[in-house]
Amino acid sequence: MRVKMLDLTREYRNNRAAYIEAVNSVFDSGAFILGDFVGKFEKELSTFTGAEHAVGVGNGTDALLLALKAAGIGEGDEVITTPFTFFATAETIIEAGAVPVFCDIDEYTYNIDTARIEALITDRTKALLPVHLYGNPCNMTDIMSIAGKHNLKVIEDCAQSIGAAYNGKYTGTFGDAGTFSFFPTKNLGCAGDGGAVITNNDDIAKTINMLRKHGSSKKYIHDIIGYNSRLDALQAAILSVKIKDIESKNLRRIAIARKYNALLSDNVIKPSVTSGAVHIYHQYTIRVEKRDDLREFLSDNGIDTAVHYPVALHKQTALEYLKASGLSVSEHAAEHVLSLPIYPEISDGEIDYVCSKVNEFVS
Ligand SMILES: *Cc1c(COP(=O)(O)O)cnc(C)c1O
């Protein structure tokens, strides 16, 4: 049997008519950048998340950069984040002019280890940037209490966690801003690049709205230096179709994760869920001793897997200059984690097959 990590054509085939209609309606409007379709989707995203404002931007990386800038992070500031994430998390801190300070992760959730944050705080620390990795929320009680005590901003990287909740509230609504990516492989993906920032802060929303269109509040009137990072109307129209189903799609992911949990051998370390959280399984990531051998064995049996992420950020060539150390949990995770196929349209038969092959290898 052949099992892909992700097959987006299955979802498209199920909803083809709705997507064609959405695309047609944008062409009929003749307006392709920002505009009514983007405004409509922004409203749907703020309603869904419960945040006051949602601002569509070009992609999830820009969502982080613009949120950091709008929160006042810049030259000389330090931002504490995790080294076990996608590169963009640290890259945007540097692009904003600040310095990423890496805090090691929890051995089981792979999220920032909140018990280690305070030791890293200095006079220059201005913000915390937690990532809800794989769709599992961070311990936001700890993070918000540390931020409150030290007067730090909090930007939540929710690229993998749309619809994930902590103590009954969606991720992205705890800190000063939450950032989303609509990259096609994410739980809410569009047909190209897209992103958004949510916030309850009027000033942050206003600033991001300006930053995304060259620092302009009125056409051809520029108050600050900004970027070209606008959400396309076509992407917004597609996202409006998809956001209607995000809750049921996330529930299907949770059901698949339960099936994996039940069927996989106890010789693999299965995902842990943060206490008080709803994990939405953007990835289902296990940990095993002989990760690379298992990966090869599964590949030989037609099963795709992925490694999120093979190199902790402080070990990336581009970031070696930071000389960050004391991050052994992240380094160990980078060597041992393996993400198995999970997406709403995967069949139960495919999951059964993946489990039987993993179990064959680890038994
Ligand atoms: C995908 C992702 C991003 C970047 O989003 P893009 O839309 O690809 O720019 C940032 N952070 C994390 C954790 C991600 O998974």
Image (tube, rainbow, N blue to C red):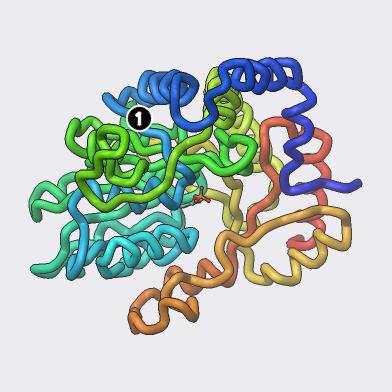
Q: Between residues 94 and 265, which one lies in front from this camera angle?
A: 94
338 to 171, vertically: above or below: below
Crowding at label 1, few (<14), some or many (≥20) Cα neighbours within 10 Å?
many
Residue lying at 74% horizontally and 64% vertically, measured from the top left = 295
* Residue 105, image quadrant: bottom left
Q: Which residue is mark 1?
A: 54
Please name the residue shown 41% across and 47% down the image: 228
Q: Considering only vertical position in the picture, is 260 above or below 101? A: above
Residue 268, by quadrant, is bottom right
Position of residue 241 measured from the top left corner of the image (x, y, whole percent): 59, 20
Q: Residue furthest right?
A: 1
- Give the x, y percent position of residue 79: 25, 62
Residue type, label 1: Ala
- Residue 188 shown left or right of residue 62 in the figure: right
Residue 193 showing in the rendered view: yes
- From the top left corner, tell me how far across and down residue 44 is, in percent: 43, 19
The number of numbered badges drawn on the structure is 1
From the viewer's side, name the closer residue of 333 and 193: 193
* Relative depth, front residue between 142 and 10: 10
Mark 1 residue element = strand
View extreme (front): residue: 220
Q: Is residue 161 above or below residue 267?
A: above
